[in-house]
Image (cartoon, rainbow, N blue to C red):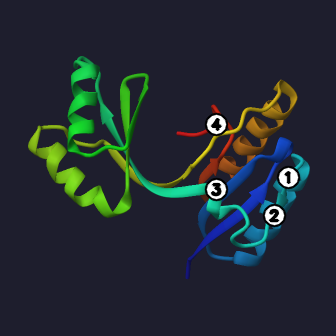
């Protein structure tokens, strides 16, 4: 039997994290996450102490290769996207969960089909860190994302989200 897990954590430079995943052994996963955090200058936080720094959002990705990315972006905004981010040949739309179903219907009506859709914790306010702390956070995020039971890592550090 698998269980959903979600951890709140603090990292270098006052960074905050929401770490989510699915595990068949919560005790093992919790201990492994604690070790990863400890190895990279972080620590687990009490439930609720970090969550208020984030908003739950639906993240939908659209392939814009060979298309007019600006026109696609306007279409996503017209359909109700709160924010859009161009990431290479992908355009990412950020949508409130309660508006996701209507948003998806609206974009499909415009012949825009998401290639990926996921729930995420999006930081309400990003923080900027010095180079040393930024490198520590990047290494921590990489180690957490490499863990087999972890499916998403969200942080409030500028440049480390979405």
Disc 2 vs disc 4: Cβ atoms closer than 8 Å? no
Reading the image, the residue beneath label 4 is 160
SS for callout 3: helix
Q: Which mark is residue 106?
A: none
Question: In the rendered image, which quarter is residue 66 located in?
Answer: top left
Q: What is the distance, in whole Å, between disc 4 and disc 1 at their CAs? A: 16 Å
- Tell me the residue that label 2 is attached to: 44
Front tag of 1 and 3: 3
56 left or right, relative to 145? left
> Which of the two discs, 1 and 3, labels the residue nearer the N terminus?
1
Could you tell me if the residues under marks 4 and 1 are in contact, i.e. CB atoms within 8 Å?
Answer: no
CA–CA distance in space, label 2 to label 4: 19 Å
Q: At 32% from the left edge and 64% from the top edge, which residue is drawn? A: 98
What element does badge 1 sit on? Answer: loop
Tell me if residue 149 can be seen.
Answer: no
Local secondary structure at mark 4: loop
Mark 1 closeness class: few <14, some 14–19, many ≥20 residues within 10 Å: many
- Among the two numbered marks 2 and 4 on one chain, the one whose residue lies closer to the N terminus: 2
Query: Where is residue 157, by image quadrant?
Result: top right
Circle 3 sits on which residue? 53
Sequence-earlier tag: 4 or 1: 1
């Amino acid at each position: 039997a698998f269980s959903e897990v979600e951890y709140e954590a603090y990292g270098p430079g006052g960074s905050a994290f929401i770490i989510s995943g699915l595990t068949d052994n919560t005790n093992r996963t919790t201990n492994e996450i604690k070790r990863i955090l400890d190895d990279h200058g972080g620590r687990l936080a009490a439930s609720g102490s970090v969550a208020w720094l984030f908003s739950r959002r639906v993240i939908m990705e659209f392939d814009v290769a060979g298309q007019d990315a600006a026109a696609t972006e306007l279409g996503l905004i017209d359909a109700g996207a709160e924010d859009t981010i161009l990431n290479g040949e992908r355009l990412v739309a950020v949508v409130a969960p309660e508006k996701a179903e209507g948003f998806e219907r609206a974009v499909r009506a415009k012949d825009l089909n998401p290639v990926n859709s996921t729930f995420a914790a999006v930081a309400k306010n990003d923080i900027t860190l010095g180079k040393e702390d930024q490198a520590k956070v990047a290494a921590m995020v990489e180690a957490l994302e490499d863990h087999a039971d972890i499916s998403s890592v969200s942080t409030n550090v500028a440049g480390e989200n979405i």
